[in-house]
């Protein structure tokens, strides 16, 4: 890549102004009366609007936007124009992630941007749902403000289910409702949608809160994202669609994809770190011929290490192509389709005049999706895998960096589970982990009770799980059993990343280790700690809301890998073990979960608290 | 069609409320807790979202919107539900016209709706450009108010070029600018777009007025429609696109279609009464494989008789299918593509839960597009070719019905053209009509001058053309020559439909006939009159702004046919003669036109007044 002129060092503000502000300047450049700020010359244009690959094309940029696309841009080149010779390389629109929780990367927006820009992601539709559960609307607002400082076209959603299933099942740091949703949409056009409405039974059965949030969203002219996990054949899916939900990433079968598109939704095909649906869902298009225009590729949740090692949307697009999608179509699924779904195709998702200059140059064949240069908002943001963009560090207020309020140090006694009898055997519910799935099973186990306390059977693979309220130091906590983790030495993991309320979750087979791990997380003001019987501590500090680190991506990825390694060394060899554990408190996905208020059963009939022990049932 | 229960007679208000207002009720019906108002059972669904034809489908409607789509809607049927048995017929979304000037039908919105509803049109994107040139923003507002009373999903655009090329070339009844555009967008979400920006040179060269209107539109979150008639290869097309123009119906070649789509626009393929581009432009898709998602079918201008005789969008869709487009794709081009282009796909353009219940049932094969029943906003609007819907008559104020202000009766002397010399021959410019094209040619003719006055050479097919200002009785007028009309007996036509300023246009080969025709139009307060030397008058009264009739469609069609017949009997056998003549004053389409201010030349170099006689050049 032959960069003829260095970027102006002082030109480091990514000004994604409305098109209305830029029209006059763009037209001046396009007609040749004002030099372009950037020109990319002589590449093969990946034209996602027409579905073509066009050789010998060039692009002229004025500020943050594309002023001209054509075979000859010589009339736009002036003395100070930065000219990049594409040398025949593919020039594609920057990739968009159509559904993503940045917090799942355990990184702040800035660190996330640093990880994904070199991979060709220039924008996304982010649901700061975890942050909202801890810090409420203030947290959402802060993430929006941080996002606006990065080169990304970062569109934020208002989380819809905070807490996920209402305040009667778990204790969150904040509660959002229709009034908060309406307020958030006044912040700017980059507040783009109502985040995934996970309480789909609430929608179908007319919950005032859910319908109120949806109405507030529609009145603001925004769209509603969905999350519907009943089967595609369920007759309640059309009811969910009738409420105005027009996108859903909970497609796990080709039929799920078909039904959503037939009902007017966009089907979002997910390739996260732990939930990898594309290989199966893409068959709706590749094998069954479904029109691709309403199919999008999304990540939902990707961990720091998978972002650093595998990539972000570049990886997902490549994977889709490997499944048999035409390369141009796969690019459409991560660019123009996504932009159209959210009503921002005039700004992002294609290399067309007037759009933001979010452009990636690729090395080698299109199907390899190997990003060499990333242009974001008209400036070189990354090149050769290295970040070039700079922007000021975003400082979160101390209330956000001091968010773990348990109120005391924990002791091994905090992890003792009282039995229903003084001694003997008692049947109990246990959360059974299923590898590579977000769902758990409700298992039944026999528990030995001695002196009124349950004795966890380590040899049978049973662990204790405990959740401590950590938002307002209410002192609330609950405990139960979990199987399938595989721990085979004394060990525990404690974490403040515990979907969705992000209370302090502790899992282990040794009460001393559990207390140690938990106290290290408390004293770090959030994070993930693994503590083993040999006294070894592995720590991933997450000081921002107890959810995110502002360390560089490689550092977070290293720390994240270390946590997984520590878990693995303790016998937990599950794929994406950390993400799986962090969902054990998620009281909206079947079948059994633990919140700070106790065990929660989630079935097709509904969501309810259930007792740990079955005696008396 | 077996209608089991009659519609409630009092239920005659077409309430197209925002989805937010309907969400709760739709979900109740969808889940079976509130009976549907209408059910259509057992048809083949034309699913334009998924691109499929699905047999055995049913639709449940609550009020104006679709609550449920599925194989079994029995849970939505109650005692008062109107059930229509589709009997296997195709159920398609109501058709949308993506670019249409209602005034071209010479009918008011209500009469237009009566003409097109039985043909399956349930909505459109209308540019009341003619009305605006006569009555300004008030006229636009009145047409919007009338449209809201009809069953149509009628989206109105703010005309952008009033007058078409600025007030220095012609005299209009009103002038619109950025402030008026901004005001119009405050009227409601059905004010949808900035109408075709015909002053494309103004956009490309940075005209403040044009860029101001575009900026006002973008700031209001609306889209900008285009009108670019330079060749597709013109390097100024990307400049036009950079200004934010995202749709254009001035595509006349497949290459025009490709270039617009490549630049991020929607290509609108036009099949009007006079301008019929689809046979040629559709080849971009049928022969050259262009992705169809950004291709739309539109009519632009269709006369009353062509609406009554041929149809509206049903005709255009059928025609596209005849050109080789897959039927489902052709339907997409007149439904979902159009709705997506204007950002209203949640409300119109597909049969999906939450959308307005705009549904057509077809007789026979899909490709015949034979509309049997039209449902608009959840109610049967037409059946078996007959209108069933009723709505109150809309009354235009007297200022709109008394809009022809010439200030005096005209006499034969008003049509005498003064020559540049006292007697002899003089060379003059003449407007040469070209059949089936909007463009004219600039011809040169030799004119005999006698006693200082031009003597029109009837034998050579030369006619006199005159335009009289008619908005404020300024007394302004101009005259010139036109060839190619074919009149071979003494005859004249006078009309207040004279694009775009709609001054009083008179064309003829006999000054007495011209005065008679003109005076009949003046005394009728607008319309079209043909007067022949045998004293025969044929009149189409257009009392609303001198542009539209509120008579039933068949009456207007008959009167329109009578005008064309009278012209034909006088020797003018041009196809769509009336529409062709009405464009002779349109000072933005090449090459030569006459306004009330004189002859205007339109070339690729620009638009300028030119003298009638060439002496002295």
Image: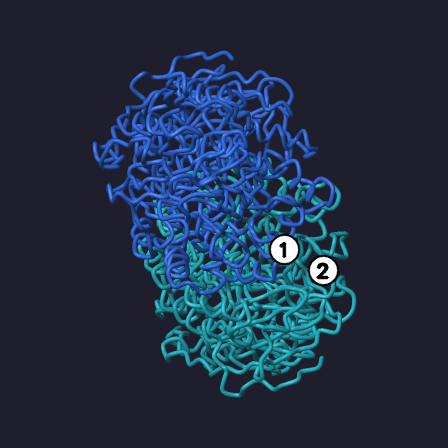
Chain colours: A blue, B cyan
Question: Could you say which is closer to the camera, residue A417 or residue A125?
Answer: A417
Is A56 situated above or below B386? above
**Hey, which quadrant is residue A326 in on the image?**
top right
Task: Please tell me how many numbered marks the rendered image carries.
Answer: 2
Question: Could you say which is closer to the camera, residue B180 or residue A521?
Answer: A521
Q: Position of residue A530 (x, y in %)?
A: 40, 24
Q: Position of residue B554 (x, y in %)?
A: 63, 80
Q: Position of residue B36 (x, y in %)?
A: 56, 75
Res. A262 mark: 1
Res. B54 mark: 2
From the viewer's perspective, is A485 left or right of B291?
Answer: left
Chain of the residue displaying label 2: B
Which structural element holds mark 1? helix
Which structural element holds mark 2? strand
Res. A336 mark: none
Q: Residue at point 48% right, 35% down?
A: A301
Is B163 situated above or below B78? above
Residue B452 seen? no
Q: Residue at point 32% right, 36% down?
A: A414
Q: Are marks 2 and 1 in contact (CB under 8 Å)?
A: yes
Chain of the residue displaying label 1: A
Question: Could you say which is closer to the camera, residue B166 or residue B229?
Answer: B229
**Hey, which quadrant is residue B97 in on the image?**
bottom right
From the viewer's perspective, is A526 left or right of B250?
Answer: left
Mark-to-mark CA distance, 2 and 1: 10 Å
Mark 2: few/some/many CA within 10 Å (<14, 14-19, 20+): some
Residue A525 seen? yes
């Amino acid at each position: 890549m032959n960069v003829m002129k260095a970027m102006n060092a002082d030109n480091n503000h990514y000004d994604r102004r409305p098109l209305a502000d830029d029209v006059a300047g763009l037209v001046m450049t396009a007609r040749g009366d004002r030099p372009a700020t950037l020109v990319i010359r002589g590449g093969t244009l990946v034209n996602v609007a027409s579905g073509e690959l066009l050789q010998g094309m060039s692009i002229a940029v004025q500020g943050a936007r594309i002023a001209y696309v054509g075979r000859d841009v010589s009339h736009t080149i002036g003395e100070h124009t930065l000219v990049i010779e594409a040398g025949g390389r593919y020039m594609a629109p920057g990739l968009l992630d159509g559904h993503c929780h940045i917090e799942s990367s355990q990184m702040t927006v800035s660190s996330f941007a640093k990880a994904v820009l070199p991979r060709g992601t220039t924008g996304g539709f982010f649901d700061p749902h975890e942050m909202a559960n801890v810090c409420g609307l203030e947290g959402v607002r802060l993430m929006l403000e941080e996002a606006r400082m990065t080169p990304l076209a970062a569109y934020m959603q208002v989380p819809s289910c905070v807490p996920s299933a209402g305040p009667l099942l778990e204790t969150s740091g904040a509660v959002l409702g229709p009034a908060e949703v309406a307020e958030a949409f006044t912040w700017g056009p980059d507040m783009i949608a109502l985040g995934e409405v996970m309480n789909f039974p609430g929608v179908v059965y007319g919950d005032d809160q859910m319908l109120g949030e949806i109405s507030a969203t529609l009145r603001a002219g925004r769209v509603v994202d969905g999350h519907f996990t009943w089967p595609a054949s369920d007759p309640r899916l059309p009811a969910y669609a009738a409420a105005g939900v027009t996108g859903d990433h909970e497609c796990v079968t080709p039929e799920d994809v078909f039904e959503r598109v037939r009902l007017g939704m966009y089907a979002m095909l997910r390739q996260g770190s732990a939930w990898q649906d594309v290989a199966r869902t893409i068959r709706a298009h590749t094998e069954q011929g479904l029109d691709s225009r309403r199919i999008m590729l999304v990540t939902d949740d990707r961990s720091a290490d998978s972002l650093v090692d595998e990539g972000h949307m570049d990886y997902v697009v490549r994977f889709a192509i490997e499944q048999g999608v035409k390369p141009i179509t796969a690019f459409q699924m991560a660019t123009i389709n996504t932009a159209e779904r959210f009503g921002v195709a005039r700004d992002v998702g294609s290399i067309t005049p007037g759009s933001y200059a979010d452009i990636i140059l690729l090395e080698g064949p299109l199907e390899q999706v190997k990003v060499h240069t990333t242009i974001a908002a008209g400036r070189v943001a990354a090149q050769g895998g290295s970040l070039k963009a700079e922007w000021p560090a975003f400082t979160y207020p101390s209330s956000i960096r001091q968010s773990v309020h348990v109120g005391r140090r924990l002791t091994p006694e905090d992890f003792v589970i009282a039995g229903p009898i003084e001694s003997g055997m008692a049947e109990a519910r246990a959360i059974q982990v299923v590898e590579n799935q977000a769902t758990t099973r409700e298992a039944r186990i026999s528990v030995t009770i001695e002196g009124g306390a349950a004795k966890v059977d380590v040899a049978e693979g049973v662990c204790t799980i405990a959740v401590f309220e950590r938002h307002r130091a209410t002192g609330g906590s609950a405990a139960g059993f979990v199987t399938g983790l595989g721990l085979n030495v004394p060990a525990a993991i404690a974490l403040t990343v515990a979907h969705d309320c992000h209370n302090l979750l502790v899992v282990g087979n040794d009460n001393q280790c559990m207390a140690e791990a938990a106290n290290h997380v408390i004293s770090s003001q959030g994070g993930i700690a693994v503590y083993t019987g040999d006294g070894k501590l592995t720590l991933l500090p997450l000081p921002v809301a107890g959810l995110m680190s502002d360390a560089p991506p490689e550092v977070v990825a290293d720390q994240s890998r270390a946590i997984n390694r520590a878990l693995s060394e303790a016998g937990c060899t599950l794929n994406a073990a950390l993400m799986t554990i962090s969902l054990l408190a998620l009281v909206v996905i079947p079948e059994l979960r633990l919140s700070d208020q106790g065990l929660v059963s989630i079935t097709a009939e509904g969501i309810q608290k259930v007792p740990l022990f079955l005696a008396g049932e």
